[in-house]
Amino acid sequence: MRNTTLCYLEQGDNYLMLHRVKKAVDENKDKWIGVGGKFEEGESPEDCLLREVREETGLTLHSWRYRGIVTFVSDEWGTEYMHLFTSDDFSGELTACPEGELAWIGKEDLLAKPIWEGDKIFLRLLQRDVPFFSLKLCYRGDTLTHAVLNGVPIR
């Protein structure tokens, strides 16, 4: 099982998104995702968040909201506990990302991009400003087979 962070940096009606196109072997290949990554030994979710955002974007977060925990269960990639954050308080200059191309994407336009089906669920929760949540997403390959929000099936 892996622990990861994912952050949606907000600027007006846009999210900073990462188009994962640079790595040969990548479970997120060709998808648009927020920024984040795997915990290193001894890191808290916040430690990982700050390091990963800085490494992938060059930006420094000044404040953030811890929005929820997303449990991904995949027949190909195993289980992942993703700690989900948002932030609209950051500084610095965007830098090139070694994992893909960064772009500001309109929140309304994002759902039409190639993203994981389960990401659409938690993006809608973020848009509705739902309080801290637990979301379980089960995948067979790239297909979402089951989703559970706060213990209640939603698909």
Image (cartoon, rainbow, N blue to C red):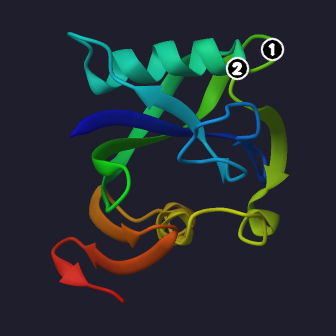
Q: Residue furthest bottom?
A: 155
Question: Which image quarter: residue 57?
Answer: top right
**Residue 151 coordinates in the image, percent (x, y):** 15, 75
Circle 2 packing at 10 Å, graded few (<14), some (14-19), many (20+), is many
Q: Which residue is mark 1?
A: 95
Q: Amino acid at mark 2?
A: Thr
Q: Residue furthest left?
A: 151
**Residue 80 coordinates in the image, percent (x, y):** 30, 46
Q: Earlier in the sequence, mark 2 or mark 1?
A: 2
Identity of the residue drawn at 82% across and 12% down: 93
Q: Secondary structure at mark 1?
A: loop
The answer to whether the residue labelled 2 contacts the one labelled 1, judged by CB atoms less than 8 Å apart, is: yes
Q: Secondary structure at mark 2?
A: helix
In the drawing, does residue 147 fall left or right of residue 5? left
Identity of the residue drawn at 57% across and 21% down: 53
Q: Residue 57: which numbered mark, if any?
A: 2
Front residue (pair 114, 92): 114
In the drawing, does residue 117 fall left or right of residue 139? right
